[in-house]
Image: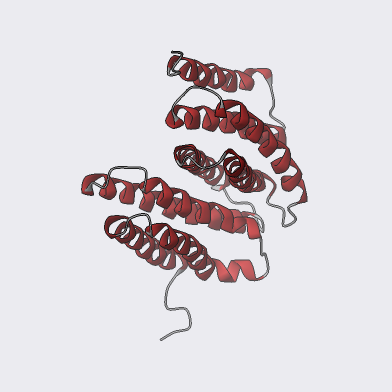
Amino acid sequence: FKKNFLTKRQRFVTGVLVLSLSLFLVEHFLTQSGIYFVILLSFLTDVFLYWALRKDLKNNFAPQVFILPFLYTLAFGLFYFSLPPRLLIQLFLTALYTVGIYSAFLAENIFIVSSIRTIALLSSARTVSFVLSIFIYAFFTNTVFSSQLSFFIILPLIFVYSLLLIVHSLWTYTLEKKIATELIWGVLLSICLVQMSFLLWFWPSKPLVISLFLTGFFYIIVGLSHLWFEKRLFKSVLWEYIWVAVFVFIVLVIFTSWT
């Protein structure tokens, strides 16, 4: 065999197929004990990513590249357990996971290459990454609020995955190896999300509605941060986020049980 008998894209495809099949088998044949296998698959996701990108990472290592794929597998795997164990639903979610994790792999590849030289696909990769981050945040938040865990466990969990997602999302705009800037922003914005979660803990609404509201809030503050880094924080652009804020607030109020 040749030393590099698989191309980078072939390695991506191999990793995606193994992860998708493994996740389907775990969710189909295992119950709550499958959570441990989901965690294992999350680490395996980063192993496949490193396998595909090890040449590019050799002289341009950035730990942020491993955040999104890891959290995507973990969030998807945990979200599975909150749904009815029906084959059709499992097949649909597996297909959705396959598309998402492959997109995540391609996006991380673009970020690593873009940190060395400018390429035209960077803007598209940022969009894909942000969309995946929104899905991850929604899945995590719905899972956390549906778990009936203690108040003192839920808030630290929200802080941790919020911080990781924000750090990665901001890194896609700076592409710096040092994470000091992203970390400071991440901590501040994560505290905002935790404070909002604290208020929503006492709000008489269902976990799904709360997760949608928090996800909308995540979209707003991270999206505004992107505009700040791009120096495009103009009044005309802000209206998009204002309307999102109005929409998610109306949804929260409408679907709140006031009785």
In the rendered image, which quarter contains the N terminus? bottom left
Residue 82: image x %, image y %? 37, 43
Side (left or right) of 152 relative to 177: left
Examine the image and state in which quarter residue 30 appears: bottom left
Residue 146: image x %, image y %? 44, 38
- Residue 182 against residue 115 in the figure, above or below: above
Side (left or right) of 11 relative to 230: left
- Residue 213 against residue 62 in the figure, above or below: above
In the rendered image, which quarter contains the C terminus? top left
Q: Nearer the viewer, residue 254 or 182?
A: 254
Residue 147: image x %, image y %? 46, 42
Residue pushed farthest left? 87
Q: Nearer the viewer, residue 25 or 60?
A: 25
Q: Residue at x 46, y 48 (%)?
A: 75
Q: Residue at x 72, y 57 (%)?
A: 177
Residue 140: image x %, image y %? 49, 43
Colour basis: secondary structure
Tally of numbered tags: 0
- Residue 100 against residue 206 in the figure, above or below: below
- Residue 86 against residue 12 in the figure, above or below: above
Q: Residue at x 22, y 49 (%)?
A: 87
Q: Nearer the viewer, residue 166 or 12?
A: 166
Residue pushed farthest bottom? 1
Examine the image and state in which quarter residue 234 appears: top right
Q: Residue at x 48, y 29 (%)?
A: 212
